[in-house]
Amino acid sequence: MYTSRWALPVSLLTVVIYLTNADVSHVVTGNTTPITDICLGCICEAMSGCNRQQSCDGNVCGLFKITHPYWVDAGKPVQAGDSPEATGAFANCVTEPFCAGRTVQNYMGRFGQDCNKDGVVDCTDYLAIHILGGFGCNGEVPVKFTNALNQCLYQASAFQNSFQK
């Protein structure tokens, strides 16, 4: 089956454009590579298909499927005018794409590491951290998430390469 090189999922492109303007000045860098906008968009794609309509389902919320402890570990980011201690601050943040993206960026800044021990901190590591947590990321990431991430990264790469020709 032939897929056009322009077949980057619209949802990924929308999220990448939407999140590109996010303030990332708070991301801690050290021995890790900051998470790229493409990686952030592909993690979103792997988690929910970047469904911006995702609300809370049990203890996970939003298009990145963020839990309350994850949000706390990320420093309790909030939307403008909200307080981290306000009722609903968690859900308000992680169901809104900019704030949810900031939450993931903060978490990766805190826990970024080479989970698969291949000598490189890359998007595969960030997905493992996102799903398995900052202290358990060397475990097995469910195949459905890995496949979705790899497909998204491949499509994003093909899309980027189409502009370089």
Image (cartoon, rainbow, N blue to C red):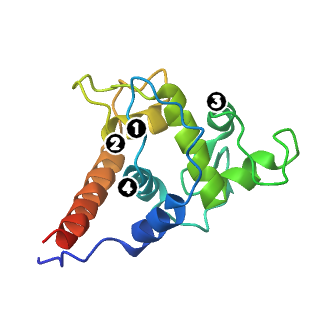
Q: Which mark is residue 25?
A: none
User: Residue at the location (88% across, 44% down)?
Assistant: 86
Q: Amino acid at mark 2?
A: Cys
Q: Which mark is residue 126?
A: 1
Label pair 2/1, CB-CB below 8 angstroms: yes
Mark 3 → mark 4, Cα distance in angstroms: 23 Å
Q: Nearer the viewer, residue 140 or 106?
A: 106
Label pair 3/4, CB-CB below 8 angstroms: no
Label pair 3/2, CB-CB below 8 angstroms: no
User: Residue at the location (32% across, 51% down)?
Assistant: 149
Q: Amino acid at mark 3?
A: Asp
Q: Amino acid at mark 1?
A: Tyr
Provide residue 74's location: percent of width, then percent of height: 63, 34
Give the mark nearer the N terminus: 3 vs 1: 3
Give the mark nearer the N terminus: 3 vs 4: 4
Provide residue 128's location: percent of width, then percent of height: 39, 35
Mark 2 → mark 1, Cα distance in angstroms: 5 Å
Label pair 2/4, CB-CB below 8 angstroms: yes
Provide residue 108's location: percent of width, then percent of height: 49, 35
Q: Dot 4 corresponds to which residue? A: 38
- SS of the residue at dot 3? helix
Question: How many other residues sit within 10 Å of disc 1, few (<14), some (14-19) or many (≥20)?
Answer: many
Q: Dot 2 corresponds to which residue? A: 123
Q: Amino acid at mark 4?
A: Ile
Provide residue 52's location: percent of width, then percent of height: 58, 67
Locate the N terminus by quadrant: bottom left
Give the mark nearer the N terminus: 3 vs 2: 3
Q: Which mark is residue 73?
A: 3
Locate the C terminus by quadrant: bottom left
